[in-house]
Image (cartoon, rainbow, N blue to C red):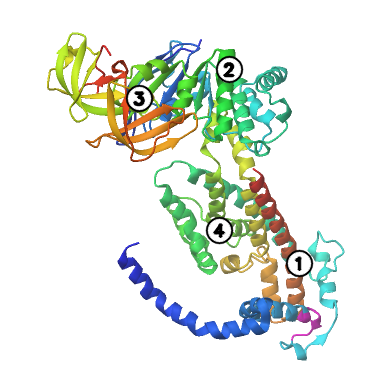
Amino acid sequence: MSALTKSVGAVLAAPAMWLAALIDKPLRALQNRAGFGGMAAFFLFPNMAIFGVFVLLPLVVNFAYSMTGGSALFLPDRSFVGGEQYARLLTCENYANPRTCTDDLFWVAVHNTALFVVLQVVAMTVVAMVTALILNRDIRARSFWRAVFFFPVLLSPVVVGLIWRWILQREGLLNYFLYQFGIEPTVWLTDRTWAFTAAIGVSIWAHVGFYALILLAGLQAIPRDLYEAAEMDGTRPSRVFWRITLPLLMPNLLVVIVLVLIRAVQIFDEVYVLTGGGPGTATLFVTQYIYEVGFASLLRNPGLASAASILMGAVLVVLTLIQLGVARRGEQKGKRS
Amino acid sequence: MGRITLTGIEKSFGAVHVLKGIDLDITAGELVVFVGPSGCGKSTLLRLIAGLDQPTGGRIEIDGRDVTRVAAADRGLAMVFQSYALYPHMTVRQNMAFGLENAHLPRPEIEARIAEASRMLEIGALLERRPGQLSGGQRQRVAIGRAIVRNPTAFLLDEPLSNLDAELRVSMRAELAALHGRLKTTMIYVTHDQVEAMTLANRIVVLRAGRIEQVDTPLNLYNRPANLFVAGFIGAPSMNLIPATVTGVAADGLACSWLDGGRVSIDAEGGAVLPGASVTLGIRPQHLKLARGHEAAIEVTVTLAEQLGAETVVHAQTKGGQRILAVLPGQPAIARGEEIALAYDAADIHAFDAEGKRLRGN
């Protein structure tokens, strides 16, 4: 290390050293009084306080709200109704038919969300996989293309929704180009099927870069020797994919599937900006239902919204536990091989 | 069968010219070892033969068939990789069967080949295990087994023992030699370890900077290195290379002045050099011994003596500053700073001209 580097380092470190000397005595005194475990609690306290105030407390309050009724906003003004809100949400003659449910809108949202999750998870995984496979090849300007696919991840979901609304609305960019080529414009966002498809497509466009990146990392971790051994063995490219790439990518793929699943269940912002849940209730998802019932509708019912969010939270907890299990299994597998 | 002929092989990666006109004829059943320092192009040459890379120029023939542009899988070769390249998610059996399944061989044929190879390599008990459950030596055997089951025209081995510990390397080396003896298939073996090269090879190809420096049997390389590079590269420790000046030329010998005015006469064809020419004389450390009388000797001061038990490696320096290395048998009592005389036999001295080429006749 040169003398210059040393002296620059010393100058930069000086304030930290001064601060360390300043708090050394009080910290030692505290440790003498509180012990080693007490010190750990002392350092953890700021984070736990923030977590408690902004996560744990709202969770408890939310649960309390779900046990109350009426439209009053403040908890003391609300009447205790026990599990009535849950009963309202969960009472159905036939769960496959929302019209037979007490709260039909909730079940429309559940059905929409379930369909969205199934289609989006499959489509997102396939698109992310294909993207990662292409970006992993020795293509020209590979870094540029990686940046292109990752760029939408950096955008705010609201911006994503606005961009695509601008493209897909009746007088939008897409219809303008279709018209230029003599193709009949389509009402993308006011047709139920197209709107739902657009919701899936836009969410894939916005997030595929992130999942492709996870898969790309997995692909790059597969040793090149294995592909060369397969080449020497005369393996067809499709067989290389199914027998070598896919099994070795499975830990990353499982993580991607579970992450996509969790995010798909929570889908709200970009679709809300894009379609507002319409046409009708075609793109109404559970999170939007909670938002509408809790805050936006004229007949707002914070208790019902809280109960719905508690139910959705329970589903997310299950999915998160699955994700943790998958990640742990992947780690153990990685250690074994 | 398994004759491999390389003619004018060239390989460039962008502006970097890695292989420069390689000509080599490997006869069927031969075990040829490519050696050379890092970056000399030995692994690249092996990959070109395997078909994993394409040469920029030249021609590769296997049994007379031009395979230069033929896909790796269609060359009938099998490769053992430095990292073994076993598929980690498959069992040993599945690893060995994979290539045969690609060739659509019937299942009984596949099982028979696996059974034969696993018997030969003593890996029968490992067939249902995954590579992660095997030791380095076991993985190495499986990698070789995967190559054997394909009944290849030739085996290509890319530093296959470099990931093993020293003890295992010695035993695997012996097993590989025995395997070659049994299979009698052409093998091309890449290594930077000259002990592996010397012990395994029928012929050694010494490469430097993308060119072949010498192709010969191990002992010929040791006894008659074609140039200064081979002289310095083959043999451990390296040959002592000492600058000298020709003082007299005869039909069958040279008289030279070396080491602070000392005189030495060597058997070498003198026609190529004239009196006054600069030459390099080489003598292997093993060919020096402690002088006991009036033998021809080099007087040196010991700078370090490494006692290895069976032999002692002496690092020394002449009065003129020329470093000399000697490997003396046994455990002579030699201490740092001691002045000793190292005797030599003039017949053991190699002579190289100013361009580094061996002078014929010695």
Mark 1, secondary structure of its residue: helix
What kind of residue is marked 1?
A: Ala
Residue A285 in sight here: yes
Q: Which residue is mark 2?
A: B178
Mark 1: give few (<14), some (14-19) or many (20+) Cα within 10 Å.
few
Of discs 1 and 2, which sits in the foreground?
A: 2
Q: Find the residue positioned furthest to the top.
A: B251
Side (left or right) of B1 relative to A96: left
- Asked whether, in this view, residue A9 is left or right of residue A221, the answer is left
Pointer 2 chain: B
Q: Is residue B326 magenta?
A: no
Quarter of the rendering containing residue B131: top right
Q: CA distance from mark 3 to mark 2?
A: 34 Å
**Residue A102 horizontal/vertical position (percent):** 83, 71
Direction front: furthest residue: B293
Q: Quadrant of residue A103?
A: bottom right
Few, some or many C-alpha atoms within 10 Å of disc 2 (few <14, some 14-19, many ≥20)? Answer: few
Q: Earlier in the sequence, mark 1 or mark 4?
A: 4
Quadrant the C terminus of chain A occupies: top right
Q: Which residue is mark 3?
A: B288
Callout 2: helix, strand or loop?
A: helix
Q: CA distance from mark 1 to mark 2?
A: 65 Å
Q: Nearer the viewer, residue A314 or A181?
A: A314
Magenta-tinted stretch: A64-71
Name the spot of residue A255 as percent of width and height, x first: 64, 53
In front here: A329 or A71? Answer: A329
